[in-house]
Every structure is written in C-alpha cells, then in structure tokens.
Image (cartoon, grey):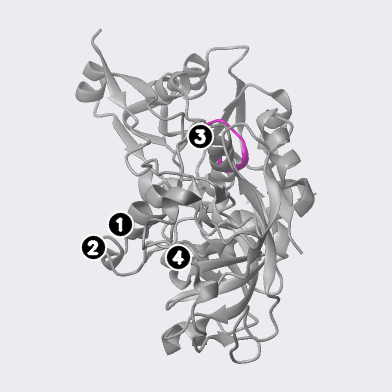
C-alpha cells in the first residue's frame, strides 16, 4: 500500500537567531529600556520609574543558555510593559514539555532566554498609552492567568477570531523571542545584556504579557494549580473544541497522557464523549487517566494500540484520535485509529524536522482528516476554561500532581525529562 511522508514542519515559525549579546547589541531593535526616560505607567502607586511605584528595581528569572545545560537563576532589571501590555507579578508557572524541547535543543529558539509559558499572577502595572478598556478589564491588583499564545488582536487572523494563528505571535515571539515591537523586555542586571522571551518568559518573578493573552482569575481558584489553564488545558481545549469539534456521544482516543493528554481526557468528558480511550506506556499514568474520564486504557508497550482501539470500538475506530507526544510512531498510530471520516488531531511537538507517515490510499478513500492544533483562542477560550475549572467540571486538583519551588526549576525539568511527573507539575514563584 502506498505510503507518503507528511512533514510536520515544526520549524516554520522557529527561525534560529544569533544568541551572543555582541551580535544582539548591533541590532537597533534590541535596546535596554532601563536607560530611557520614564514613561507615565499605570502601576501600583499610579506611576514611577526604575521599576515603577512600589515595585523593586530588579527581579530574578530562570535563564536557558544552551542545549542540555541546567537553567540558572539570574537577576534582571525590572521589565517594563509597553502599550497594550501588562506587568504581572508571577505566582506560578507550569512545567511543560515544550520548554523541555527547547532545553534539550530539539526545537530551535533564540538564546539566552527565559522559558515558562503558562502562568498565574497579579497585575501590577499597565504600559503607557494602554487603552481604558484594557485598564478597566484588568485593573492593577487583578488576579490573572496568561495563555501561552498571546494574540496581538490586530492581524488578519486575530481580526477573524483565530487567535491561535496570530501572525505577530509566530513572527516575533516564536521566531525571534521578542514581543510584537521586535524587542525583548528582559535585560540582565549585571551587564544589561538582552535575554529573549519564550511566550512571556514566565519562569521569573515578574513578566510582561500582551493584555489580549490575559484573563481574570476568580478568588476561588488557587494561583498554583490554575497556571496549567494557560497551556495544558488551553491546548487540550483548542484540540477538542476547534480542531476535533467533539460532540456528545463521540468516541475519543488520546495517545500520550501527560499534562496535555490528560487534560484532553477531561475536556472530552466535559464535551460528552462516550468511549474515552487513554493510551500510554506507563501503567501508573493509565490508572490516573481513569480519574480524568478514561473509560478504557491501553498500554501500548504491551499490546498494539490500533488493534485494541478497533476492538473496543467494534472494529470501526474512534471518531477522534489525539496524538499528544510528537513522535513518528504515535503519529501513524493516531491516523490508523480513526474510523472512516474520522479526525486525527496532532498536538504533540516533536524534534525539529520530524516526519510522520500516512497511508495515502486510506486517507483519500476513507476521508480521513489529519489536523494540526497548537492551542486555543485566548480571548474567547481562556474565560471558558476558567469557568470550567471554577465549576469543577475541569478538576485542577487531579490535574496537578506536583509542585516545585522557584529554586527547583532546573530539577523540575530534569524530573520531567526522566518521566517522574504524572500529569502536570507547577513551579511556585511567590
């Protein structure tokens, strides 16, 4: 049977940039705002310079320097928001495989940088000339959660409500490690050297986030566990609601039940899926998957997952299969697990340049849909996710299995790499 290679081109928006400061300093688009005159910021005490009224003059952040080297905690000048941005005092940041891919050099990203892209915290400052509606929606002191896709709100995709395809996010943040004026907000305290930002650079005591990527977090939801709403749950919701369009009674298989995969199980249950099949190689994860809504579990290290899924579904396959690992083998398993007309949704990032195989004849004759999904749509989806968590439909307590201190950030990613984290872990930065 004919096979074709379908490239999962994960480096379309990940252009490698020079990492040394000597190179960065030659570009006029990277400059140190700590050397500029003070702007009229809206902050904790109504304005100020050198960190804003009531704010410290510097902070700490966890820096990624080069592949396979541990993160180090460094001091930074206090970052300053610009128009349409908010400065957040970070309370918690999730531990995600996307960051681990960068740490291991599997996905190119500008360095040095501060990783961390699912956060909760408190708004402490608005950038100058921020519009009144943003300040009213996110007043200083607001408890908030930030999504890893931070929509600009102005590009052709954002104007249509497709925040997950925001042109500025991919062109500037993912390609260059900056915000949407082409500049980072992070500069080392001892040297003034610029440091790039993976999303908002949430593994820091303070971070700057475009206001469109932030939503208010109610008092009833705790800062630490709510951090995962910004990526793990956000990614799962985008896959289930927009890519797969899961309907009540649909059968769903999730291949890979880590932080994002287990969130897919909960979202599938919330959407009324009937058979929910969890596939993994660890029995401990599969046992936990049952608490997230899995009606069946398959250990793919012990039995063929495609055959087992067909057996569970009476030989038909599932309506929706989700691949949450980013591996060629599981990519193929995902496409082979869906029924005629079914949807194979790919959400797992892989090493740059990885390829996936698909059976062309089956794809064509049986109308198989292969769909990529990176995340949700911040402005419309983030408030919904917060509400799901607030009502208990999405169980944050079950989803977060472990917490680390800020000083343990490097250990958290080491544990993630060694498979020691079941579900999602969170780093507390309080």
**Residue lying farthest top?**
1
Residue that appears at 42% across and 46% down? 374
Task: Identify the secondary structure beneath mark 1.
Answer: helix
In the rendered structure, find residue 31 and report the number of the disc placed on it. Answer: 4
Q: Name the residue under label 1.
A: 167
Q: Where is residue 155 in the image (x, y as percent from the top left)?
A: 27, 64
Instruction: Classify the position of the N terminus by image quarter.
Output: top left
Q: Position of residue 204 (x, y in %)?
A: 65, 59
Q: Mark 3 points at which residue?
A: 324
Question: Which mark sits nearer the N-terminus, 4 or 2?
Answer: 4
335 relative to 115 in the view: left or right: left
Q: Nearer the viewer, mark 3 or mark 1?
A: 1
Question: Which mark sits nearer the N-terminus, 1 or 2?
Answer: 2
Task: Identify the secondary structure beneath mark 2.
Answer: loop
Question: Which mark sits nearer the N-terminus, 3 or 4?
Answer: 4
Q: Nearer the viewer, mark 4 or mark 1?
A: 4
Q: Where is residue 282 in the image (x, y as percent from the top left)?
A: 68, 23
Q: Which of marks 3 and 4 is in front?
A: 4
What span is colored magenta in the figure? Answer: 255-260
| Residue 50 sits inside the magenta stretch | no
Residue 391 visible from this viewpoint: no
Whether pointer 1 and pointer 2 mark residues with C-beta atoms closer than 8 Å, the reply is: yes
How far, Cα to Cα, is label 1 from label 2? 8 Å
Q: Name the residue under label 2.
A: 156
Q: Which of marks 3 and 2 is in front?
A: 2
């Amino acid at each position: 049977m004919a096979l074709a290679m379908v490239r999962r081109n994960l480096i379309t928006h990940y252009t490698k940039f020079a990492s040394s400061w000597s190179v960065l300093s030659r570009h006029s688009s990277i400059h140190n705002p700590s050397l500029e005159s003070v702007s009229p910021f809206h902050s904790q005490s109504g304005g100020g310079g050198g960190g804003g009224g009531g704010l410290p003059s510097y902070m700490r952040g966890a820096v990624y320097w080069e592949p396979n080297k541990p993160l180090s905690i460094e001091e930074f000048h206090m970052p300053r928001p610009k128009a349409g941005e908010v400065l957040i005092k970070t309370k918690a940041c999730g531990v995600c495989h996307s960051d681990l891919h960068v740490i291991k050099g599997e996905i190119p990203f500008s360095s040095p940088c501060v990783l961390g892209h699912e956060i909760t915290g408190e708004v402490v400052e608005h950038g100058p000339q921020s519009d009144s509606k943003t300040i009213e929606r996110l007043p200083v002191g607001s408890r908030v959660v930030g999504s890893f896709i931070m929509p600009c709100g102005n590009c052709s995709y954002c104007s249509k409500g497709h925040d997950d395809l925001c042109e500025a996010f991919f062109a500037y943040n993912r390609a260059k490690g900056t915000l949407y004026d082409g500049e980072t907000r992070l500069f080392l305290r001892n040297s003034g050297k610029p440091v790039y930002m993976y999303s908002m650079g949430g593994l820091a005591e303070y971070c700057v986030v475009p206001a469109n990527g932030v939503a208010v977090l109610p008092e009833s939801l705790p800062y630490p566990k709510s951090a995962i709403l910004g990526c793990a749950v956000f990614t799962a919701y985008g896959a289930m609601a927009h890519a797969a369009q899961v309907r009540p009674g649909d059968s769903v298989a999730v291949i890979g039940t880590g932080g994002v995969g287990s969130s897919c199980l909960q979202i599938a249950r919330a959407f009324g899926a009937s058979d929910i099949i969890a596939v993994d190689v660890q029995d401990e994860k599969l046992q936990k998957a049952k608490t997230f809504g899995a009606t069946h579990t398959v250990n793919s290290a012990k039995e063929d997952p495609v055959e087992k899924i067909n057996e569970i579904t009476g030989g038909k396959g599932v309506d929706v299969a989700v691949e949450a690992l980013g591996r060629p083998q599981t990519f193929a398993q995902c496409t082979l697990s869906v029924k005629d007309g079914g949807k194979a949704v790919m959400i797992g990032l892989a090493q740059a340049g990885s390829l996936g195989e698909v059976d062309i004849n089956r794809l064509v004759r049986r109308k198989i849909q292969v769909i990529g999904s990176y995340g949700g749509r911040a402005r419309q989806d983030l408030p919904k996710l917060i509400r799901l968590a607030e009502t208990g439909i999405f169980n944050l307590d079950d989803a977060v299995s472990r917490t680390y201190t800020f000083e343990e950030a490097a250990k958290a990613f080491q544990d993630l790499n060694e498979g020691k984290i079941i579900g999602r872990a969170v780093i507390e930065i309080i």
